[in-house]
Amino acid sequence: MTPHPRRGTVELRPGYTVLDATGTPVDRAEDVEFTLEGGFAHLRLPGTRTVQTVSAPAVHRLTHPA
């Protein structure tokens, strides 16, 4: 089964961060492309060329339009 990419907002639990387009660690980002697969969230933040992976327990909330 191929993961279905979505676009929305990601909020990480305290102590977890990903890097935004300027290289700044952030724990919340909007307009993120994400997929969930095998206990991990794969995130591509706006303006970045890489996908950052965090474990599912690091994710506090994912929201996206219906």
Image: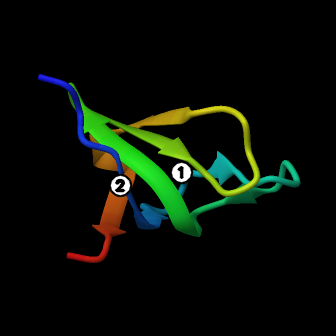
How many marks the image carries: the answer is 2
Q: Nearer the viewer, residue 29 or 2?
A: 2
Answer with mark 2 or mark 1, whichever residue precedes in sequence. Answer: 1
Residue 59 is marked as: 2
Are the residues tagged 2 and 1 within 8 Å (C-beta)?
no
| Residue found at the very far left of the displayed protein | 1
- Crowdedness of circle 2 by 10 Å Cα count: few (<14), some, many (20+)? some
Which residue does the numbered mark 1 point to in the structure image? 16
Q: Residue at x 57, y 33 (%)?
A: 51
Q: Position of residue 54 (x, y in %)?
A: 44, 37
Secondary structure beneath label 2? strand
Q: Nearer the viewer, residue 21 or 1?
A: 1
| Placement of the N terminus among the 4 image quadrants | top left
Determine whether, in the image, residue 10 is placed left or right of residue 66: right
Q: Nearer the viewer, residue 23 or 51?
A: 51
Q: Residue at x 84, y 48 (%)?
A: 23
Q: CA distance from mark 2 to mark 1?
A: 8 Å
| Placement of the C terminus among the 4 image quadrants | bottom left
Q: Residue at x 29, y 46 (%)?
A: 57
